[in-house]
Image (spheres, rainbow, N blue to C red):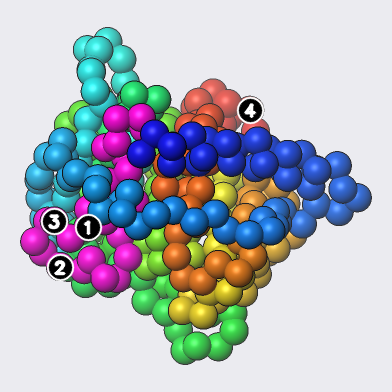
Amino acid sequence: MTSAFRKAAAGGFAFLLSAALGACASVDTGIDRIGSAPVLDPAVLKSLPDTGFEAGEFRAKNDVRIPYRWLAPNSLDPDDRYPLVVVMHSSGQIGEDNAAQLNGFARTWASPEIRARYPVFVLVPQFPTRSAEYDDPAKPQLARGTAALTAALEAVDAFVAEHPVDRRRIYVTGFSMGGSASWLSPLLRPDLFAAAVPMSGIAPSRESASRLTGLPILALHGDADTENPIDSDRAMIAAIRAAGGERARLREYAGLDHRVAGDVFFGTWWRDWMFDQRRPKPEEKSEE
């Protein structure tokens, strides 16, 4: 695992370099193209334990029950508050067993290297039904939120109220349906998230782009994805940037199908970027 962690961390230089080169170009489209997707041995993910995740459940106002698992920082200082990462699962983990949602990506947060580097809370809700629905397979497709996603965001509020969470540093990420939910969550709760990292999801209507111009977004997607085609993310990033949102970027992986890129699982490059983002203080908002 240590070797995988080192390789993933090395991706940080390439990420920063591509962003810098994009910024220097005459026209920055917000798209960073990666020549080939790194591969991670599946055995590494299978070896990850799900120990350390506590169990809980929440019943929302709409009567949807949300089981969830959560992970605390290695050590808690009573005088500190900590970031919270909300990990949205894909459609294959829909259910109510409060276990299936701990997929390989979710469990990377419990790896010793990641926990040591990032003292954060991690919340992994499980959806009893889909968190995002898609329209007809027109290109590019559009995603819309569901009652289950609304309930999960209410569960986030309840979790924050019960734990020492830094309310300026709440983040959302996820793969596939979870990537779509990561796009939709800041629209449903514009007051909640400091950044979003949707992976291989379907973006919402481009008409909502103006509502995302102030949010740091790093979308990750393979250009060979036929299940959730990348066209949706490309169109949404273009729409956000056309509306004045310069903090939205898309990282395209050449030849990658509907999978998480190998440099993402244990990657520090995107986690470092994400945790650098903070919601503005109230006085900063009033000055804008």
From the image, which quarter does the N terminus lie in?
top left
Give the residue displayed 18% in from the left and 45% down from the top.
50
Q: Please report whichever mark, 4 or 3, sits nearer to the chain's N-terminal start.
A: 3
Q: Residues under labels 4 and 3: Cα distance?
A: 45 Å
**Under tag 1, what secondary structure?**
loop
Q: Nearer the viewer, mark 2 or mark 3?
A: 3
Q: With respect to residue 65, does 283 lie above or below?
A: above
Residue picked out by circle 2? 95
**Under tag 4, what secondary structure?**
helix
Is 125 positioned to the left or the right of 265 in the image? Answer: left
Query: The disc labelled 4 sits on which kind of residue?
Result: Glu
Residue picked out by circle 3? 99
Q: Residues under labels 1 and 2: Cα distance?
A: 8 Å
Residue picked out by circle 1? 101
Q: With respect to residue 191, does 133 lie above or below?
A: below
Q: Please report whichever mark, 1 or 2, sits nearer to the chain's N-terminal start.
A: 2
Q: Give the range drawn in magenta.
A: 87-114
Query: The disc labelled 1 sits on which kind of residue?
Result: Gln
- Give percent across and percent down for residue 235: 65, 69
Packing grade of label 2 (10 A; few <14, some 14-19, many >=20) is some
Q: Residues under labels 2 and 4: Cα distance?
A: 45 Å
Packing grade of label 3 (10 A; few <14, some 14-19, many >=20) is some
Is 68 positioned to the left or the right of 37 in the image? Answer: left
- Residue 112 in magenta stretch: yes
Quadrant of the rendered image containing residue 286: top right
